[in-house]
Image: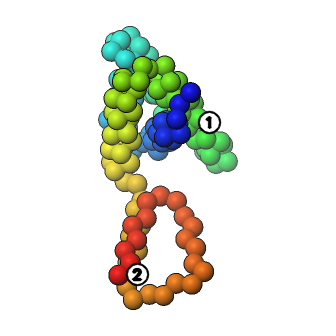
Amino acid sequence: MLVEALVALASAGGGAVVQAAGTDAWNGLRDGIARLLGRGDAARERGELERLDRTRAVLEAADGDEAERVRTAQTAVWRSRLEMLLEELPEAERQQVAEELRALVERAGGAAGGQSVRNDFSNSTFEKSAVLGSGTQHNTFN
């Protein structure tokens, strides 16, 4: 059974695959994910590349209300594939693969032009405040 951190990493990897499709980040992420899942077997890696290309085609073909359903389904597919990979590996190798996956996700997020919000609050007073949102937020309190 995987620890929560690895499950979260697999989930981030699945999300990165879906987010990168159709962006400049796609080729690097695609090759990296295929390499991880192929585990040094050229035939398996080619199979993963084909699977990733089908994912991209499905995502690009989806429109309207169907698009969100397809994105959710594809995220789940890749999350599951990455979870199974991490679960099957011996502990020492698992940590190495987890680091490689983490680096892929981070690079893909930057290359895909992920949104980042920067808020600077100088000389401000907050009472019963709440911040809602998603993505990355950088808050500076002076």
Mark 2 or mark 1, which is nearer the start of the sequence?
1
- Quadrant of the image for the N terminus? top right
Query: Who's the residue at 39% across and 18% down the image?
Result: 38
- Toward the right, the furthest residue is 65
- In this rendering, the count of numbered labels is 2
Q: Nearer the viewer, residue 69 or 14?
A: 14
Query: Who's the residue at 48% across and 40% down the image?
Result: 5
| Element under disc 1 | helix
Res 33 quadrant in image: top left
Percent position (x, y) of residue 30?
Answer: 38, 31
Label 2 crowd (10 A; few <14 / some 14-19 / many >=20): few
Dot 2 amino acid type: Phe
| Element under disc 2 | strand
- Please say if 136 is above or below 25: below
Res 105 quadrant in image: top left
Instruction: Read off the residue under disc 1.
Output: 73
Q: How is the image coloured?
A: rainbow
Q: Report the mark closest to the observer, 1 or 2.
A: 2
Q: Which mark is residue 84?
A: none
The answer to whether residue 99 is seen in the rendering is yes
Dot 1 amino acid type: Ala
- Please say if 70 is above or below 128: above
Query: Who's the residue at 44% across and 87% down the image?
Result: 124
Label 1 crowd (10 A; few <14 / some 14-19 / many >=20): few
Percent position (x, y) of residue 2?
Answer: 53, 31
Percent position (x, y) of residue 127?
Answer: 57, 84
Instruction: Read off the residue under disc 2.
Output: 121
Q: Nearer the viewer, residue 69 or 37?
A: 37
Q: Is residue 139 rendered to the left or right of residue 18?
A: left
Percent position (x, y) of residue 74?
Answer: 57, 35
Query: Who's the residue at 40% across and 81% down the image?
Result: 121
